[in-house]
Image (cartoon, rainbow, N blue to C red):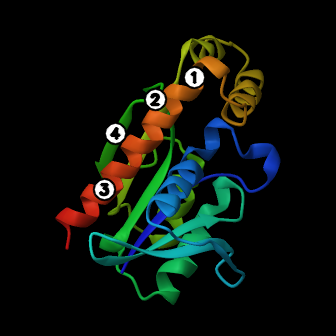
Amino acid sequence: MRLIVGLGNPGKEFELTRHNLGFKTVDFLNKEFKGFFELDKKAGAEVSEVKIEGQKVLLAKPQVFVNNSGQAVKKLMARSKLRIADLIVIHDDLDIPFAKVKLSFARGSAGHKGVESIIRALKTDKFYRIRIGTFNRELLKIRKVKNPKKRLNEMNKFVVSPFKVSEKSKVRKAVKEAAQKAVSIISIRR
């Protein structure tokens, strides 16, 4: 079995925000492979079991805020008796140009608090990550703010801000590309 975890924040108010690109991608995969999400209270995540490329895959959306994702991922891994090599994490990335998708393996968190939480909980970074870019001109302006406290506050507002209408078609394409990358990892690593 494989585990694909999409990072995001639970709740309707965060549904269409930049920080929820992981959730959106896992939702796309769930629809594509005809799954059904149920709440796993012990793991603290919504989960759906689907078949992708002939393999059982557990799709998961931790029901904690992004920055605390590690414990939910650790519980899911333990309960399903999975190895680190079976884990794929999908998340937003402020350092990648908007709507670009990158695949990485065994890399540090690069400041992403959700990924940092997972690395701490699992005591390793030896898993696949699919990173969806959110960097744009607005973020460039925020990074130039001199006051560190104000800059952090603006950055936090940015990641939980909704997409502009003009960005939505690019977001759909990026989510589909991220989902395809997840499927390709599963088909390669049988």
Q: CA–CA distance between discs 4 and 3? A: 13 Å
Task: Return the residue at label 3.
Answer: 106
- Do callouts 2 and 3 mark residues in contact (Cβ within 8 Å)? no
Quadrant of the rendered image containing residue 141: top right
Q: Earlier in the sequence, mark 2 or mark 1?
A: 2
The residue shown at (31%, 45%) is 103
In front: label 4 or label 2:
2
> Amino acid type of disc 2?
Ala
**Residue in front for this viewpoint, 183 or 6:** 183
User: Which residue bears the numbered disc 1?
Assistant: 167
Task: Name which of mark 2 and mark 3 comes first in the sequence.
Answer: 2
Distance of label 1 from label 4 (alpha carbons):
18 Å
Name the residue carrying label 2: 99
x then y, percent, for residue 177:
37, 41
Q: Amino acid at mark 3?
A: Ala
Percent position of residue 142, x then y:
65, 16
Q: What crowding class fits label 2: few (fewer than 14 Cα within 10 Å), some (14-19), or many (20 or more)?
A: many
Number of the front mark, 1 or 3: 1
Q: Residues within 10 Å of mark 4 (few under 14, many from 20)?
A: some
18 or 74: nearer the viewer: 18
Cα–Cα gap, marks 2 and 1:
9 Å
Relative to residue 14, is residue 118 depicted above or below? below
User: Dividing the picture into quarters, in which one does residue 157 lie?
Assistant: top right
Asked whether the viewer can see residue 134, the reply is no
Residue in the picture at 72% in, 46% down: 15
Amino acid found under the numbered disc labelled 1: Glu
Disc 4 and disc 2: Cα gap in Å?
10 Å
Q: Secondary structure at mark 1?
A: helix
